Amino acid sequence: MGRWEPNAQSRLRQAAMELYAERGFDRTTVAEIAERAGLTERTFFRHFTDKREVLFAGSERLHEMLVASVASSSEPPGVASVAAAFDRAAAEYFPPVAYSRQRQRVIDANPALQERELAKLDRVAAALASALRERGLGDPAAALAAEAGVAAFKVAFARWMTDPADGPLVDHMRECFTGLRSLAAPAPAGS
Amino acid sequence: MGRWEPNAQSRLRQAAMELYAERGFDRTTVAEIAERAGLTERTFFRHFTDKREVLFAGSERLHEMLVASVASSSEPPGVASVAAAFDRAAAEYFPPVAYSRQRQRVIDANPALQERELAKLDRVAAALASALRERGLGDPAAALAAEAGVAAFKVAFARWMTDPADGPLVDHMRECFTGLRSLAAPAPAGS
DNA sequence: AAGACTATGTCAGTCGCTGACATCATGGTG
DNA sequence: CACCATGATGTCAGCGACTGACATAGTCTT
C-alpha cells in the first residue's frame, strides 16, 4: 500500500476503533494504528491532534447542528429551544445503536476518553449558551438553560446506550427533558 | 535540603501552582516542579498520579462533603437536597476568592486542565445521583437532579470567579439554583 | 515538461509517566 | 546500643505520545 491511497483519515479512524475495541485504548500505540491503516505515526498526528481525538471526529457537526438549530428556532430562547435542537439532532446525527454502543464501551473503559467526551459536551454547552444570548436571553439564564439542556442530553444518551428495550434516542431525550422540567415538583419516589 | 524535609506533598503543590502561574502549565516540566520543591520527578509521581492532578488535590473532600450532605439531608431526595448540599459546601469548603481566582486563571488557560476539572465534576454528579438513589429516588430523576444540580453549580462558580462585585459564592449559588427552578417558565429577556 | 502545491515519510528530540532496585531516615525490639 | 522492619526518597532505564525540520513523492496547472 503506497502513498496516496484514498481516505487516509477514515482508514485511521477505523483502524483506531478496531484496535481500541480489541485491546483497549492504552494497550494500543499510535504506531500500530498507523500501521494498520498503511500510514505512519507522524501522519496520524497530521490528521488528529491526539490519540483520543480520533474517536471524536465528526463531533463538530453535532455542535454546529445544535447551534444552528437554537439560533433559528421558532421557540423563545430557553430550555425548550435547546430541547428542540437535541430532538432534531437525535434524528439526524446519531449513528445506529450498535455502532454507538461499541464506541461507548471503548470510552467507558478509559478515563482519559471520558474526559475528552465531557470536554466536547462542555464546549457544546458553551456554544449553546452563547447562541441563547445572541437571541436575547440574559445571564445566568442562558448559561443555565444550556448547561441543564446538555445535562439532560447526557442522561438521555446514557440511558439510550444501556436501554435493554432498545428504544430510540428521541424517546429517551423527551423523557429526560420532561423530567428536567418537573425537577422542582418531584414525582413520587420510584418514578 | 536533604531527604525528610516535612510536607513534601504541599511543597509540591505550591511549587506547581507557582510555576503554572508564572510560565503556564505546558511550559512547566514536572522535573522543574520537583526541583523547586527540593525533590525528584519520580517522587512527584508518587504523590500525584499525573501532572494535572496536583491542581486538584483536596477535591475528594468536597466530593465527600456533598455526598454526606445529600445522604443525611432532611429534605426529600431531589434538586433541593442537592442545592442544600452545595449551599453548605460553599460555606465550608471553598478557599478565599483570591486564591481560587489565581487557580482558575491557570485552569482556564489550558484545555487539558479544563478536561480534568470537568471530569471531577462529573464524578461528583455520579456520586450525587447514586446518593439520591440510595434515598429512594428513581431514575432518570436521580441522574437528572444530580446533573442539573452540578450544572447550576458550574454556572454559579464561574460567575463567582468573574463577579466584579466580589459577591460571596453562596449568593451566586442561590441565584443559580433559583434560576434552575424557573427554567421552564422563562423570565423576561435580559433577566 | 516544469514548477507549485500538498500529503506523506524520515529522523531526532522532549517530556510525561512507570517499573525495578538502591538508599536513607525513623521507630521499635532485643 | 545494635539491629531490623518500614516507608519515603533517589537513581536509572525505558516506553510511548507528540513535535519540529527537512526530504520525498504524488497531483495539478500552465
Image: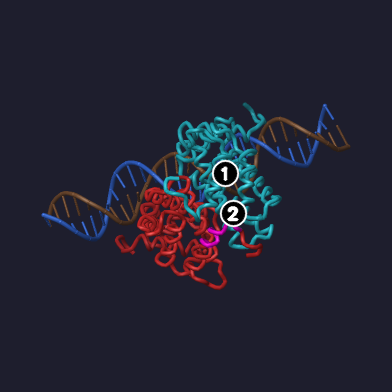
Chain colours: A red, B cyan, C brown, D blue
Q: Which residue appears at 66% of the width and 47% of the height?
A: B64
Q: Chain of mark 2?
A: B
Question: Which residue is the site of mark 1?
Answer: B174
- Horizontal placement of B84 versus A14: left or right? right
What secondary structure is found at the residue carrying circle 1?
Answer: helix
Q: In the depicted view, which residue is nearer to us: A80 or B187? A: B187
What secondary structure is found at the residue carrying circle 2?
Answer: helix
Q: State the residue lying farthest toward the front.
A: B188
Q: Which residue appears at 60% of the width and 50% of the height?
A: B124
Q: Nearer the viewer, mark 1 or mark 2?
A: 1
Dominant SS of magenta comes to: helix
Callout 1 crowding tier (Cα within 10 Å): few <14, some 14–19, many ≥20: some
How far apart, in angstroms, are the residues tagged by discs 1 and 2? 16 Å
- Horizontal placement of A179 versus C22: left or right? left
Q: Quadrant of residue B95?
A: top right
Image quarter (top left, top right, bottom left or bottom right) of the N terminus of chain A: bottom left
Callout 2 crowding tier (Cα within 10 Å): few <14, some 14–19, many ≥20: many
Q: Chain of mark 1?
A: B
Question: Which residue is the site of mark 2?
Answer: B146
Q: Earlier in the sequence, mark 1 or mark 2?
A: 2
